[in-house]
Amino acid sequence: MPSPRMTEDEIWAFVRDAPTGILTTLRRDGVPIALPLWYACLDRRIYVRTRGRKLQRIKRDARASFLVESGTRWAELKAVHLTGTAEIVDLEPGLARQFEQEVDRKYGSLQATGTEMAPETAEYYAKVLNNVVRFTPDDRVLNWDNAKIAGEG
């Protein structure tokens, strides 16, 4: 029977291009909180601009996981689950440009503009979305691509 496992290159191409990722952080009591978000994958690390309590959770406990998945039918199911650590970072200018370019490549046509939302909302997001989290995976990578065993991959 063929293996549903992806190659290293397939894993990172899938992670790079998936539209949404799910970042899981840990509450103080150890309960995991999984939240979907937009992200950029640069040099096999995940970068997100974010806000809210996940920043407090990351400061308290850096352990995290990141999941990307796709598919509706069984034969289409495909996923990569990464474990690692998350940290709040200041991006040096070159990396900040790469991050912005990648976010624009993936989401430029999907982002709401200031004219599509109330001015107060646009101002709020401009202020709070200035934190960047970097997720660095460790060597534990779970992955599968059911198309490989369904004869479609």
Image (tube, rainbow, N blue to C red):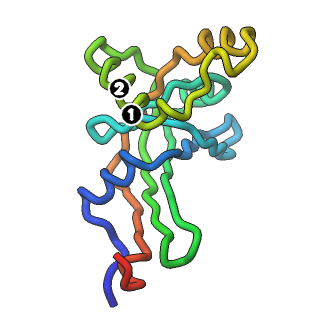
Near-viewer residue (108 or 23)? 108
Q: Where is residue 106 shown, x and y percent of the image?
A: 43, 37
Which of the image's four quarters has the C terminus? Answer: bottom left
From the image, tell me which residue sits under label 2: 101
Going by the numbered disc 2, the residue's amino acid type is: Gln
Q: Residue at x 51, y 60 (%)?
A: 70
Horizontal placement of 39 versus 102: left or right? right
**Residue 86 position (above or below residue 97):** below
Q: Residue at x 29, y 21 (%)?
A: 95
Q: Where is residue 68 shown, x and y percent of the image?
A: 48, 53
Horizontal placement of 130 versus 119: left or right? left
Q: Secondary structure at mark 1?
A: helix
Q: Where is residue 69 shown, x and y percent of the image?
A: 50, 58
Which of the image's four quarters has the N terminus? Answer: bottom left
**Residue 128 position (above or below residue 3):** above
Quarter of the image for residue 81 reads: bottom left
Q: Secondary structure at mark 2?
A: helix
From the image, tell me which residue sits under label 1: 105
Going by the numbered disc 1, the residue's amino acid type is: Arg
Q: Circles 1 and 2: CB distance less than 8 Å? A: yes
Q: Residue at x 39, y 49 (%)?
A: 15
Residues under labels 1 and 2: Cα distance? 6 Å
Q: Residue at x 36, y 45 (%)?
A: 16
Number of numbered markers: 2
Quarter of the image for residue 91 reads: top left
Horizontal placement of 39 versus 13: left or right? right
